[in-house]
Amino acid sequence: MNLIKEAAKAVGWLTGALAGIVAILYACGYLIIQTQLHLLGIDVLLPSGREYYLQEGANFFIVTGQKLGLLLLGLVALVLIFHIPIAIISKTPRGANYISRLKGRFLAIHERHKWLWQAAVLLLMVALLFFPLVNDLDLFRAPLELSGLLHTAQDDNVAGTRSSEANTIAGWVTTGDVKSLDNFYYNLLMHCLFAALLLMAAQGVTSAWPFRSLIIFPFLLVFVIYLFLLPLDYVVLEKRIEFPTVTFISTFDKVSNESGTLLLLNKTDQEFILWNQAEKRALWLPRDKVVKVEIGRMQPVFKKDLLKRKEAR
């Protein structure tokens, strides 16, 4: 009976954990999809399903996890560069004696002026919290200033209402500069990692302090804000704006007479939502008006703009 009870508890815990993971993936996927639709300016046209939200949420964690893993490997390598020489020196009698005396002096000074050291370290962390972390919060907000790029990619009036960082990112998006977008996302990930390290350091320094929760709160708040904005920035910087090309045979004259490349933005049981790249406008096509449809390869939405810019140069 005890074995059955333990098994039931394990199953219940596993079920709750899976439900929590699914909820996180769904929430991230929903934010990602809605942010991309807002970025393109077609958020009212394209409702998406639960499975799609889960898929996009999982993609976010996979891509971000890979990039974060590379950053952590770099951090570990940096630590090893300093640790390995010290470990080698400590293996020699003279080196071990010198390191032991150095540790003894440092611990004696630390114990004698413990509160002074902790206060100095905390002041340093507060300074780092406000610069670069809080000061660089505009970097996280810049990608979110972009919206309606399908219709306003070349609109100078819209560009004048955005920050210089947002206009730079808009240029990268519309010209397909994947490397610059990727580097900017790495920069945001480094800010998140630095915020996490500051939060852990603040918890360690103030472990025996009164009002500890109040002191740690600013560090926690900045870290949470960064985490919340990261999936939204991922949409602009990492999720490529690509849709499949389509060719229709339709009884709907407006679609049959369309010239240029048509991209399939969304498909449901009742309708197709299309994008005409040449004329930069969205089209709605009822499912019952379609006689035949051929779906081609994925194609960047802003491919035409890139070619025009190259020709102009």
Image (cartoon, rainbow, N blue to C red):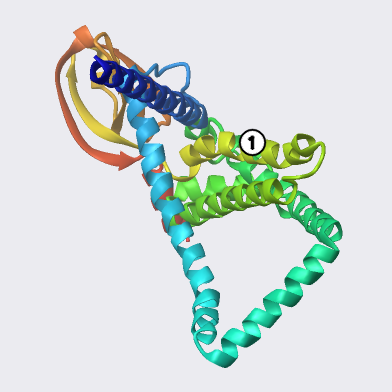
Where in the figure is residue 292, as x and y percent of width and height? 13, 19
Q: Specify the quadrant of the image occupied by residue 227.
A: top right
Q: Specify the quadrant of the image occupied by residue 12.
A: top left
Q: Nearer the viewer, residue 50 or 24?
A: 24
Q: Specify the quadrant of the image occupied by residue 208.
A: top right
Query: In the image, 111: left or right of 266?
Result: right
Asked if residue 241 shows in the view, the reply is no
Q: Nearer the viewer, residue 218 or 272?
A: 218
Where in the figure is residue 115, as x and y percent of width and height? 84, 56
Query: In the image, 285: left or right of 135?
Result: left
Please count the marks in the image: 1
Q: Is residue 155 above or below residue 254?
A: below
- Which residue: 75% across, 35% down? 213
Q: Nearer the viewer, residue 101 or 157?
A: 101
Q: Nearer the viewer, residue 235 or 170?
A: 235
Q: Amino acid at mark 1?
A: Ile
Asked if residue 30 shows in the view, the reply is yes
Residue ranking furthest to the bottom: 94
Q: Is residue 151 above or below residue 160?
A: above
Where in the figure is residue 133, as x and y percent of width and height? 70, 49
Q: Return the residue at label 1.
A: 225
- Which residue: 54% across, 53% down? 184
Q: Is residue 283 above or below residue 121?
A: above
Label 1 crowd (10 A; few <14 / some 14-19 / many >=20): few
Where in the figure is residue 88, as x and y percent of width and height? 49, 84
- Which residue: 27% across, 14% down? 268
Query: In the image, 165: left or right of 247?
Result: right
Query: In the image, 1: left or right of 95?
Result: left
Q: Is residue 93 above or below residue 46?
A: below
Q: Quadrant of the N terminus?
A: top left
Describe the element under mark 1 as helix, strand or loop.
helix
